Image: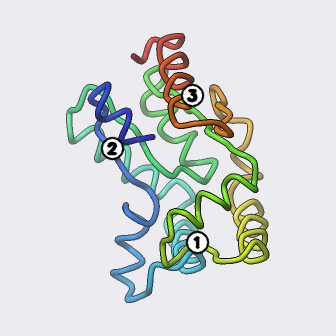
């Protein structure tokens, strides 16, 4: 949905995960971009440099870019939320977009990236690890939540509504 925000509202995209700063660090460390490596590298750098390490980098990049609107993609950690909220205040809105596990798995299979789980069992193990490592600390910190069990059109309508209601459109 970051691409949608960029196309419709001219939000500049800042990526946290595999295609962003954590992926860059993982590659720099000479590792393949697997989910486990991305999780482990993210955890390692946060343990060494502080849990807000990547959030500070992204926030600095946003400030340096002097863009009017920014979206941070692939937020996982509590500090990925609290740090930009502290830095940008009321100008930072966290939208949690969620779908049922079955739908998320079907979409991963369709996406067909090498790093994605290939079986439902692998997916469930990944989800459990991801929840333990990240989500249990950050769930509930969002400003609003959008259900993404429907169509892309419905998701876009929901995003438009949330942005308008919060003064971000």
Nearest to the observer: residue 167 or residue 160: 160
Q: Which mark is residue 13?
A: 2
Residue 40 appears at what percent x and percent y?
A: 58, 77
| Label whose residue precedes the other's in the sequence (3 or 1) | 1
Foreground label between 3 and 2: 3
Foreground residue, 134 or 11? 11
Circle 3 Cα neighbour tier, 10 Å, few/some/many (<14 / 14–19 / ≥20)? few
The x, y position of residue 98, in whole percent, is 67, 42
CA distance for labels 3 and 2: 22 Å
Q: Is mark 3 on a helix, strand or loop?
A: helix
Residue at x 64% of width, y 48% of height:
78
Seen in the image, is 152 located left or right of residue 136?
left
Where does residue 53 sit, x and y in percent of width and height?
47, 58
Q: Which mark is residue 96?
A: none
Are the residues tagged 3 and 1 within 8 Å (C-beta)?
Answer: no
Where is mark 3, residue-wise?
154
Local SS, label 2: strand
Task: Name the residue: 64% across, 38% down.
Answer: 148
Q: Disc 3 to disc 1, how far (Cα)?
A: 31 Å
User: Which residue is found at the position 57% from the left and 74% from the top?
Assistant: 35
Q: In which quarter of the image is the N terminus?
A: top left
The residue beneath circle 1 is: 39
Q: Residue furthest bottom?
A: 30
Instruction: Name the front one of labels 3 and 1.
Output: 3
Q: In this view, does 143 lie above or below 101?
A: above
Q: What SS does tag 1 mark?
A: helix
């Amino acid at each position: 949905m970051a691409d949608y925000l960029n196309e419709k509202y001219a939000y500049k995209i800042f990526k946290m995960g595999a295609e962003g700063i954590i992926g860059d660090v993982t590659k720099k460390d000479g590792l393949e971009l697997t989910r486990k490596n991305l999780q482990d590298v993210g955890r390692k750098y946060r343990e060494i440099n502080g849990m807000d390490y990547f959030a500070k980098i992204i926030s600095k990049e946003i400030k340096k870019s002097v863009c009017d609107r920014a979206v941070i993609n692939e937020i996982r950690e509590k500090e990925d939320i609290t740090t930009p909220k502290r830095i940008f205040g009321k100008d930072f809105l966290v939208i949690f977009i969620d779908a049922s596990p079955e739908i998320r798995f079907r979409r991963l299979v369709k996406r067909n990236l090498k790093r994605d789980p290939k079986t439902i069992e692998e997916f469930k193990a990944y989800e459990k690890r991801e929840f333990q490592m990240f989500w249990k600390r950050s769930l509930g910190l969002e400003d609003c939540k959008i259900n993404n069990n429907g169509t892309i059109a419905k998701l876009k309508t929901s995003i438009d509504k949330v942005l308008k209601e919060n003064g971000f459109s």
